[in-house]
Image (cartoon, rainbow, N blue to C red):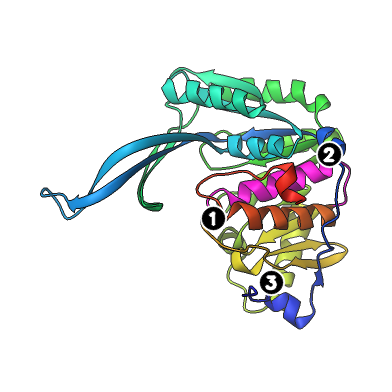
């Protein structure tokens, strides 16, 4: 079954994305991406449900297996290395068991970790309880890093900037990107492309970014609800001009994704065969675009690759990645 076409494609406001072209593996291998942002540990408890609790009308889960995965900005960096790129990760974690688990998983993923450690910070955890591949509950543990640790991260950012081609800001509103405005300004002054996965309604803090990649809900929070594709284009154009974004890539779930630039509007229809789990799909999209730009590809080709990668990753459970062979299979 073909996914529905977006209004923009149907009305002819957007040109279709180009076909995905094969990119030599060595080009991706030369891409150097620095991911900065909020990291978390995605912890999964898998079990069976055979009865209801006598204490409350809730299922009793007999946990039989636990799995830990990198989440947030760490998952973005893991997606970049899965494609064969060189990825660095600048973030803050605590001195605790989840923090050590993140350190270990980063090492296994081939990510170059540049970690600031905050002894008073409990590392962010998203604990998901699942039974028969269905999520029953999510429990979050989180807090905000100390000001001194964030300032140390800003100094580390300046040192890392010259050795990376593309800077990627992954904002999950956990406090790790308190100095994002200064980071973007310094990166652009150094001639680097800056990609931002935004959070919240204050996008002034992302001023000057090269590409911003909201989903529909995130964009509505900033520009309001649009009534048509013409209305959407007008609102996005106004936003881009006010905040000096070179491009805005809107991810639209079953409708694919739409790229807005000064050259016009480009739409990529959804490429998913079967949607199993959309968690982490945005991480895959922005990581793929960043790797493509780091490999010297044009943005429109990066969008086509990201759309294909998103179609693959939503067919996997939980935060997952797409590797080079899967992308070009």
Secondary structure mostly seen in the magenta stretch: helix
- Label 3: state its secondary structure: helix
- Does residue 325 sit above or below 186 in this rendering? below
Horizontal and vertical percent position of residue 322: 66, 45
Q: Evaluate whether residue 144 shows in this view.
A: yes
* Image quadrant in which the N terminus is located: bottom right
Q: Earlier along the polypeptide chain: callout 2 or callout 1?
A: 2
Q: Quadrant of residue 178?
A: top right
Q: Which stretch is magenta?
A: 278-298
Mark pair 2, 1: CA separation: 27 Å
Q: Which residue is mark 2?
A: 25
* Residue 297 within the segment the image draws in magenta: yes
Residue at the limit of the structure toward the front, as seen here: 329
- Label 2: state its secondary structure: helix
Q: Earlier along the polypeptide chain: callout 1 or callout 3?
A: 3
Task: Give the label on residue 120, or none.
Answer: none
Q: Which residue is mark 3?
A: 232
Residue at position x 75%, y 23% in the image: 160
Report crowding for label 3: few under 14, some 14 to 19, many 20 or more residues within 10 A (C-alpha). some
Q: Which residue is mark 1?
A: 278
- Does residue 30 sit above or below 255 in this rendering? above
Residue at position x 87%, y 42% in the image: 24
Horizontal and vertical percent position of residue 179: 64, 33
* Residue 143 within the segment the image draws in magenta: no
Horizontal and vertical percent position of residue 291: 77, 41
Residue at the limit of the structure toward the bottom, as seen here: 11
Q: Earlier along the polypeptide chain: callout 3 or callout 2?
A: 2
Mark pair 3, 2: CA separation: 37 Å
Residue at position x 32%, y 37% in the image: 64
Residue at the limit of the structure toward the left, as seen here: 54
């Amino acid at each position: 079954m073909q996914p529905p076409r977006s209004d923009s494609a149907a009305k002819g406001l957007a040109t279709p994305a180009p076909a995905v072209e094969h990119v030599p593996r060595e080009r991706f291998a030369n891409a150097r991406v620095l991911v900065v942002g909020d990291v978390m540990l995605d912890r999964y408890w898998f079990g069976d449900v055979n009865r209801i609790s006598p204490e409350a009308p809730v299922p009793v889960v007999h946990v039989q297996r636990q799995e830990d995965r990198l989440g947030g900005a760490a998952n973005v960096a893991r997606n970049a290395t899965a494609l064969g790129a060189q990825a660095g990760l600048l973030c803050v974690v605590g001195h605790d068991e989840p923090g050590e688990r993140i350190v270990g998983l980063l090492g296994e993923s081939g990510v170059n970790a540049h970690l600031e450690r905050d002894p008073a910070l409990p590392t962010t955890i998203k604990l998901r309880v699942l039974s028969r591949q269905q999520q029953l509950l999510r429990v979050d543990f989180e807090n905000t890093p100390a000001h001194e640790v964030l300032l140390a991260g800003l100094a580390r950012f300046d040192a890392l900037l010259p050795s990376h081609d593309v800077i990627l800001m992954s904002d999950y509103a956990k406090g790790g990107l308190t100095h994002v405005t200064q980071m973007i300004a310094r990166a652009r002054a150094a001639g680097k492309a800056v990609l931002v996965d935004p959070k919240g309604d204050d996008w002034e803090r992302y001023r000057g970014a090269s590409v911003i990649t909201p989903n529909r809900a995130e964009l509505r929070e900033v520009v309001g609800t649009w009534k048509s594709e013409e209305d959407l284009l007008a609102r996005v154009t106004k936003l881009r001009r006010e905040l000096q974004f070179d491009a805005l890539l809107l991810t639209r779930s079953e409708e694919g994704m739409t790229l807005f630039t000064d050259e016009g509007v480009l739409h990529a229809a959804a490429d998913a065969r079967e949607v199993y789990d959309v968690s982490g799909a945005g991480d895959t999209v922005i990581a793929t675009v960043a790797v493509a730009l780091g490999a010297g590809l044009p943005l429109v080709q990066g969008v086509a690759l990201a759309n294909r990668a998103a179609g693959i990753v939503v067919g996997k459970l939980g935060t997952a990645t797409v590797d080079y062979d899967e992308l070009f299979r």
